[in-house]
Every structure is written in C-alpha cells, then in structure tokens.
Image (tube, rainbow, N blue to C red):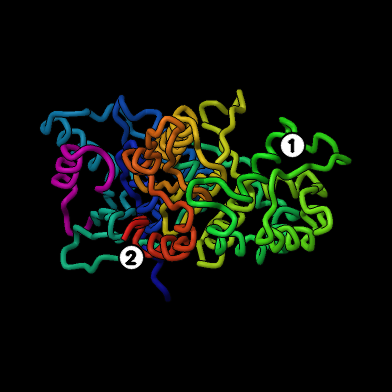
Amino acid sequence: MKNTPQQTVMVCIATAQSAANILPVMIRKPDQVVIVQSAKMIRQARALKHWLVNFGGYSSEQIETYEDLPDSGINSLSEYALNLRGDLENSLPDHRLILNATGGNKLMTLAFVDVFRDDNIEIIYTDTENDTLEVIEPKNRQPELVSSIFTIASYLASQGYIARKADSEDEDWCSNALHRKPLTKWLADNIDRVVKSDGSGFLPQINGLIHRDVLDANGGLKSSRDYQELSYVSRRDHELLKRLSEEGILSWTAGDEKKIQFTSAESARYMGGRWLEEYVWHIARDAGAECLAAGQDITAEQQRKDDVRNELDLVIVHNNRLLLVECKTGQIQKEQRDSEVIYKLDSLANHAGGLFCERLLVSAAPLDHERKNGQKVKVSSRARSYDIDVLQYQGLKKLREVLLGWMETGVLKTED
C-alpha cells in the first residue's frame, strides 16, 4: 500500500515584487498558501492571490490571508510569527509547513526564519540572480534550479498589467513576416548600404515619404492611386527597389526610377518602420526565446475600466525574465523626441517590468547626431544613463549574439 504524500502549506510574506512569492509557490506547489500582509502590502497581497487564482491553478479556498503584520519591531514580528505558526499547526495538523523567506523586508525575514526554524519545517529562499531555490532548512540540501514559470501574460500580470492583443498573434501578421523574412534580414545585414552614417540615405528618404505623403493618421493609405516621387535614386538603390517590387511591397520600374507606388497600407507600414520590429522578432524567435510578442498592447490593472493602452514594440520572456525592446527606424532629430522615446521605455520598464526586466533600444539609423549649429547630441549616452542598452545602425548585426547572452545570463551586454 502506497503512502499518501503529506499535504503542505506555504507561508508567504506579501512584498512589492510578486515574483518573490510566485516562483517558490509554483515550484513547490503547496496544497495551501498563506499570505501574510502588513498594512502597506494590502494591494500586493490581493494581487498575489489574484495571480495564483488566474495563472497558478489555485482556487480561492486554497489561499488564506493573514492581516496586521507589523512593519517593524523585531519583538512584535517574532510574536506575530509565533502566533501564526501555532495557529497553522492547530488548524492544519496534517500539513507540513513551508516558509518562503524571499518576501517581506529583512527584519520580517529574520523574525520568521527564527520562529519557523525546525527540523519538520522547510525554509526556502529564491535566489533570482542565480536562478536557484535555496533550502535553508533542513540543512545540507543542494540548491535547485528555478524552472521557467512566466509567460508574457503571467509576467505582466505579476506586475499589475494586463496583456491585451499583440500584432504577432494575428495569422496574417505572422504569414507576412515569415514570407518577407529574407528581405527583412537583408535590410538589417545591409543597413550601411541603405542608411548613411549621418542618418541620411535611401531608406530614411522612403521612411520620411511614407509618414509624410503615404499613410494617414490611422495608418491607412491616403490614396491607393497616388504615385510618390523620390528625391534621388542612385544606381545602387536599384537593387533594393527591384527587390521591393518583386516582393510586392511597391510598384517600380527602372525606366521611371523615381516613381514608386505602395501596393497596400500594410506594405507601407512595413517600410515605414515595421520591418525592424519584424527583424527583432525573427532573431529572437530563431534564437529560441520562450515567449515572444510584437506590437503588444498592455493596460494597467488599475486602469482596466478606462482601457488606457500602451504599445510595446517587442516583449520577450525567457527564464522568468523580461526584455522590452523599442524599435526606431528614423533618426531622432529633436531633443524633445529623443526624450519621449527614452522616457516611454524607461517608464514602462519600471512599471510593467519590475526588477527582472532589461530594456533595449534598437535603431536602424545612428542615434547620435549633430544639429545644424554643430552641436552634438548624444542620444545613446542619454539612453544608457537610464539603464537602457542600445543597438544602433551596424550594431544591428550583433542582435542575435546580444539576445543569446541575455537568454543565458539574464544580463544585456551590447558593448564590448
């Protein structure tokens, strides 16, 4: 006759970063979860329970919340922990206790570990930096590797955000992206042929024409019958124009080399910047990223009713870490504009990304430029001052290497 495994109950201290509790719960899969909350962590405790019910496979009946945990005072904290342990041992005598020592502040952790230290109680700590779960008690246990838990939706939910629609969830989007993958990779591999080191060139010319004359404010064609006139076309540009024509992106003939016509709004959006998003999507997909979305709309849980949305160009979740990527194909010429791009990425990363988020700004054109008065604008330096890594211009060719490094270590390294 087989012995029935002893049921378990895990004690978690509500904390600002929900992953500190989510990961150990999902690894150990206790039968019951007890969330201990202080007055400052009521919202976080509620969010943790919401996540466990909606993404963790738990029912509300399996989760119990204990209130009024002191925020400070070792004696008060120890007394609270002692009463909690006694209550659980009395109410759940057949359950083995597990203490997750990852949440709460340091004083809370010290008090709870001291009170719960017992040969029959497992005390665990999640070392997220090294992707391991450490067993503090019983002693002499080997650390365990933390498995991949988060998807894009569940990671964002752990930060209080709702993952809405993503462009890459659409079958037509994926079909188009895969069909023109060779063209997309050609553009990135030959970026120095279509964009000059000062940010000018043939591709920026087309980009500017699209946003000025081709697409309306809603991303549709202003007129499907209009031809556009290019300012200049070199013999070297014929290769790209011929390729774009063969791919059905636009209509063009060498006999009338300056005249082009986009075949659809989708094709114009592709050449107007979407090709770079598709390039990052292809590279991440081919590199084996666990979860990936392009054009991901998100809404803060607190703004659900208002349906206020932000769009993330690329979102990647791998090994419980998040990477947010912002893509730019045109040169950021105005100081206000470069501040907007950097602030948007920094703000979204801080709110929707949390501690385990890296941010990357990818630009087809050189970010740094010189104003007409000769003043040099170091956009890349400003981005890095916000902990935003940068891949620009010919650095696009390093993207696969950078992503593979991040997937392995959780750290972005864009500079040698």
Q: Earlier in the sequence, mark 2 or mark 1?
A: 2
What residue do we see at 71% from left, 53% from top? Answer: 173
Q: Is residue 27 left or right of residue 239?
A: left
Tell me the magenta residue range.
101-121
- Residue 230 occupies quadrant: top right
Q: Is residue 292 left or right of residue 349?
A: right
What residue do we see at 44% from left, 40% from top? Answer: 369
**Circle 1 sits on which residue?**
215
Front one among 226 and 97: 226
In the rendered view of the protein, which quadrant contains the N terminus? Answer: bottom left
Q: Is residue 306 above or below residue 32?
A: above
Q: Would residue 108 be counted in the magenta stretch?
A: yes
Residue 390 x %, y %: 41, 49
Front one among 121 and 104: 104
**Circle 2 sits on which residue?**
145
- Residue 320 occupies quadrant: bottom left
Residue 113 x %, y %: 17, 47
Q: Would residue 179 be counted in the magenta stretch?
A: no
Q: Secondary structure at mark 1?
A: loop
**Amino acid at pointer 1:** Leu
Front one among 220 and 243: 243
Residue 76 x %, y %: 15, 29
Front one among 86 and 216: 216
Residue 34 shows in this picture: no
